[in-house]
Image: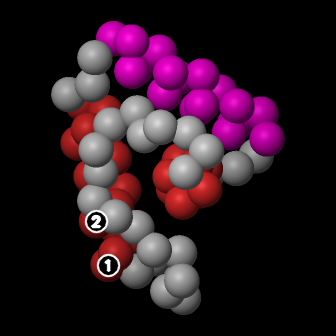
Amino acid sequence: MSTEEREFIKSVDDAILSASPKTLKQLQELDVKTQLDGNSFYEEYATSLESKKEKPLFKTKPFSKNKPY
């Protein structure tokens, strides 16, 4: 795992710890979906940010999937 990926995961984790109950509910739904699909929560969230289809649930540091793992 790259340093950039670790920083992104830490920023997501930090944001989750201070998220509102409404945001936590949305994150819980995303978590359940990723578990059922067999995907990583962090990868799914990063993908949704990159596609810009969904509004971010909270602020995180930018993440680029262009770097090798």
Residue 7: give its label.
2
Count of numbered circles on the image:
2
Give the vertical position of 1 relative to 14 (above or below): below
Residue 7 in the image: x percent, y percent? Answer: 28, 65
Could you tell me what secondary structure mostly forms the magenta stretch? helix
Residue 3 appears left or right of 28: left
Residue 40: give its label.
none
Residue 59 in the image: x percent, y percent? Answer: 28, 44
Residue 3: give its label.
1
Using the rendered view, name the quadrant where residue 35 is placed. top right
Which amino acid, mark 2?
A: Glu
**Residue with the most extreme bottom position:** 68
**55 and 28: which one is in front?**
55
**CA distance separating discs 2 and 1:** 6 Å
**21 and 58: which one is in front?**
58
* Residue 15 appears in the rendering: yes
Q: Where the N terminus falls, by quadrant? A: bottom left
Point out the stretch of residues depicted in magenta: 21-37
